[in-house]
Image: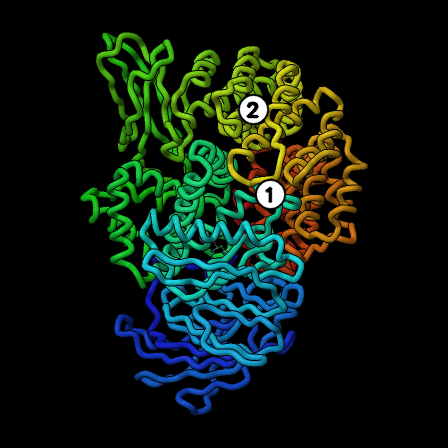
Amino acid sequence: MTIQDTIYLSDYTPFGFIVEDVHLTFKLAPTTTRVISRIRFAPNPDSPSRDFFLHGEGLNLQWAKVDGADVTPEIIKGGLRCDVPDAAFTWECEVEIDPQGNTALEGLYMSNGMYCTQCEAEGFRNITFYPDRPDVMSKFTVRIEGDSPVLLSNGNPVDSGDGWAEWHDPWPKPAYLFALVAGDLRNFPGSFTTMSGRDVELNLWVRPGDEGKCAFGMEALKKSMTWDEETYGREYDLDIFNIVAVDDFNMGAMENKGLNIFNSAVVLASPETSTDSNFERIEAIIAHEYFHNWTGNRITCRDWFQLCLKEGLTVFRDQQFTGDMRGHAVKRINDVVTLRSRQFREDSGPLAHPPRPDQFVEINNFYTVTVYEKGAEVINMLKHLVGDDGYKKALDLYFARHDGDAATIEDWLQVFEDATGRDLTQFKHWYTDAGTPHLKVTDNFENGTYTLNFTQETAPTPGQDEKPARVIPIAVGLLNPNGDEVVPTQILEMTEAAQSYSFEGLNAKPVPSILRGFSAPVVLERETSATEQAFMLAHDTDPFNKWEAGHALTREVLINMTQGGTPDQGLLDGLAAVARDHSLDPAFRALALALPGQDNIASTLAARDITPDPDKIWRALQTLKQAVAQHLQDIWPRLLAEMATPGPYSPDAEPAGKRALHGVALSYLSQIDGGASAENAYASAGNMTEQLSALACLLSVEKGQDELAAFRKQWQNDRLVMDKWFGLQVSYASPQTCVETAQRLSQDDDFNWKNPNRFRAVFGALMMHHAGFHRADGAGYDLLADWLIKLDPVNGQISARMSTGYETWKRYDAARQAKARAALERINATPDLSRNLGEMVTRILGA
Ligand code: PHE
Ligand code: ZN
């Protein structure tokens, strides 16, 4: 990447014109769609610039007019320039585009004969010439002409007739929220009455045949609408809300105003075809996109550096929602597991960047776990610091002050300062600095006073050597040696590099429960003993730290086993106690009995300057799984019986939690019964959760070939279930066969590699199979490189995203590093690499 390709936050200037309104006419045809635009511009009083530059890419300009007179704009790289009057004027032009040939799935493209759009972040410039930047907001009127029975765009329907429809969106919006859909779609209808009594028409649009998979999504939408009214006082603001499911989509879903577009994998659901985690994810994503209507659409981002303004906040809101719907303890544990496995990994490697970056080459590469998940964690910390009331006041002020704005992180923090009187200067480092702080703790007890001594340190990240101390809210509670809580949770506010806190008047040295609820996204380091961890697993009143104690204990045992140790008796007894404890929620027990992922062990070792050996990690996990399976052998059959969920399937948290624990029991039991129970479970499975979990158990003990064939036969016409069929075989292959399995599946007739879901099913599973992908002979690195090179000209967004498989390459031994480097350099040497993949590989190699 050359330096000129880099875009800097510090270069921000407003656009020289305001857009008063936009009229678009689409004449749809698969390879020759015409887009006619009529846009009213006026000089922007807030900008001295009169440079009339419009973005545009891959557009075939037919003609252009200014105030009705023909003009010949200068076509330049990435857009056009034109002389315009020094007063308000009307710009008109017609372009031709080729939706059928658009395989990148950005702009207007076709999926199974249906037209659809994806404009975030910079896709609108593939549709027509326009100032394609989020701070340019305008009202859109859209006319669609085409022979599809269903013609949709943003806002409210105005009028329609045979072969045409018109839509008007009364809310000014940036071009990235534009959407259009046309196709032969079926409608699953619903309705909602808002808190002020307005009736809203709801529709879920799907391909013929998918009508039976809509009911759950529709309910989730209604729940989201109610929740946002009750929790944030936010009401919906159009007469109609449409959701469309498409099969070819780069991401999860998109919050286009009044016309959300979803990857069909995250909206279509039925008990027969979707697992419990699918249901939970669908509910969360529907909520997420709906919540964007306020946090993203009514208040948008000034520029793409501010992406976490809408994404961090909207993730935080959808996490609150899921907690309210399904239970906060389990939700928090799941969120932290994701954060650690993906964001901590990103934050400690070559791709580390702050939630608000200050430079980028390709914005699509910044839709990251750091922007999304860490962006949400930063808000969680803010809420701890200002309290629930402060948070509510700040959010009310945010909506009141910034409705209709394209805002910044500075605006967001100002609202918290004004609403609560706090100075957030130091807090801002969470937005501007990359890297995960390591928090070290020691303690001492003297004359009834217990003291905790903290130090914080953040390692340098690419381009950022200086790491000033952060504000860290540390939630702490103290337990007595008998297990009672002596000091309930309180928030310690750490602001210095080193700081101590004392608790007086204690009779005995307490056991500290630190970072309860994971109150800050940091790595906690504390010398502790297996006995103390087992004690916390048994007694901590904070559900997150209770889980954390068991998790940390298991991780230490595993690390010890990679260095030649054996399974620890205390751990086995602790797990047995949890498994048997009927007072604990089954979903919690399932999480507590799950073993840490291999990448988690590898990253822990790397942080301690020990080179991780993927094969040893794999073997340690296999050995521990066996040991747990045997030690608890009479518990598993009992759990299978107790956790059965007979009767009609419900995706609610309670039965889903039972199925989760049932699945864990089955997987341990399979380790010792040769797969016999899993074969029975597969044969009697009544829903996809049971069917898939039984199949996974069989594959992990190298059985299940007959079931795999039967599964394919049963589900060959369901593309979403077939994605599972592809993915499962790679995920549950042994380290020795994983690459060959991926290779074989990539030759299958049903491996439609241009479909992002199918590509990810196989190659996402490969890159996440730690011991398989990091195989010593480099076969994993090579196979992924082959396919990224092949995919890149077709879809650079997906090839770039999947290149993160290599982001940890510097952790491993010299021989593996050499093989990974060779694969990365081979990708880098490929002619005409997309800007997306080019930037990623440059950054990863720069490690
Ligand atoms: N804005 C979408 C979301 O988080 C994600 C997305 C980004 C989708 C870019 C498509 C393209 O909800
Ligand atoms: Zn989002």
What kind of element bears circle 1? helix
- Residue identified by numbered label 1: 805
Q: How many marks?
A: 2
Q: Which residue corresponds to the image point at 65% horizontal and 46% vertical from the top-left?
A: 273
> Mark 2 and mark 1 in contact (Cβ < 8 Å)?
no
Comparing 559 with 134, the one in front is 134
Comparing 424 with 554, the one in front is 554
Residue 195 image-quadrant placement = bottom left
Task: Tell me which colouring the rendered structure shows.
Answer: rainbow
Is the residue marked by circle 1 packed among few (<14), some (14-19), or many (20+) residues within 10 Å?
A: many
Where is residue 633 shown, x and y percent of the image?
65, 16
Whether 607 is drawn above or below 307: the answer is above
Horizontally, residue 702 falls left or right of residue 822, namely right
Where is residue 728 shown, x and y percent of the image?
69, 40
Horizontally, residue 574 falls left or right of residue 792, namely left
Horizontally, residue 538 falls left or right of residue 507, namely right
Q: Which residue corresponds to the image point at 59% horizontal and 42% vertical from the top-left?
A: 806
Q: Tell me if residue 454 can be seen.
A: yes
Where is residue 251 shown, x and y percent of the image?
55, 54
- Residue identified by numbered label 2: 593
Whether 403 is drawn above or below 721: the answer is below
Does label 1 or label 2 sit earlier along the sequence?
2
**Disc 1, ligand 1: is the CB inside 8 Å?**
no
Comparing 579 with 399, the one in front is 579
The image's mark for residue 736 is none
Whether 715 is drawn above or below 484: the answer is below
Residue 173 image-quadrant placement = bottom left
Amino acid of disc 2: Leu
Amino acid of disc 1: Gly
Q: Residue furthest bottom?
A: 69
